[in-house]
Image (tube, rainbow, N blue to C red):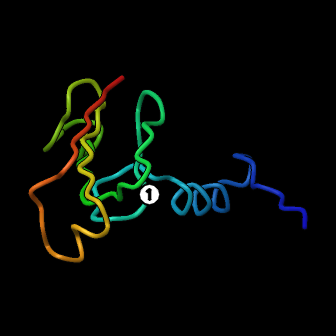
């Protein structure tokens, strides 16, 4: 199977693709986003991601220089609602 990713020449398709593929943004669960480099979270799942929020002029939440904070938890702990072992990472540009 061959997939052709949209180019930025097709602004609508490119924007829709980027919205689906981009892992940045604040979220509960899902795939984490890292501004520097991938952090191996083997065995840990994203619990909460807090990303920079706002528009180009006003930022309501800012983690340093375009940073992101991630909180991870082990699946078995999450199923037991045990948040005593949460792993936290933060990085910025």
Give the residue furthest to the bottom: 79
Q: Position of residue 27 (x, y in %)?
A: 29, 61
Point 40% across, 46% down: residue = 41
Point 57% across, 54% down: residue = 18
Q: Is residue 87 left or right of residue 31?
A: left
- Number of numbered discs present? 1
Q: Position of residue 91 (x, y in %)?
A: 30, 29
- Where the N terminus falls, by quadrant? bottom right
Q: Position of residue 80 (x, y in %)?
A: 17, 76
Occupied quadrant, residue 15: bottom right
Q: Is residue 86 left or right of residue 26?
A: left
Occupied quadrant, residue 56: top left
Circle 1: element type: loop
Occupied quadrant, residue 44: bottom left
Q: Which residue is mark 1?
A: 31
- Judge the density around disc 1: few (<14), some (14-19), many (≥20) Cα neighbours within 10 Å: few
Is 30 or 72 nearer to us in this picture? Answer: 72
Is 66 or 10 nearer to us in this picture? Answer: 66
- Where the C terminus falls, by quadrant? top left
Point 26% across, 37% down: residue = 89
Q: Is residue 46 left or right of residue 77?
A: right
Q: Position of residue 73 (x, y in %)?
A: 25, 57
Against 4, is 91 above or below?
A: above
Is 91 or 73 nearer to us in this picture? Answer: 73
Point 27% across, 24% down: residue = 65
Give the residue furthest to the right: 1
Against 17, is 87 above or below?
A: above
């Amino acid at each position: 199977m061959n997939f052709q990713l949209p180019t930025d020449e097709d602004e609508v398709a490119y924007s829709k693709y980027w919205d689906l593929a981009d892992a940045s943004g604040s979220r509960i669960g899902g795939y984490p986003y890292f501004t520097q480099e991938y952090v191996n979270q083997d065995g840990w799942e994203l619990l909460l991601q807090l990303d920079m929020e706002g528009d180009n002029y006003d930022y309501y939440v800012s983690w340093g220089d375009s940073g992101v904070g991630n909180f991870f938890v082990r699946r078995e702990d999450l199923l037991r609602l045990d948040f005593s072992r949460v792993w936290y990472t933060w990085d910025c540009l």
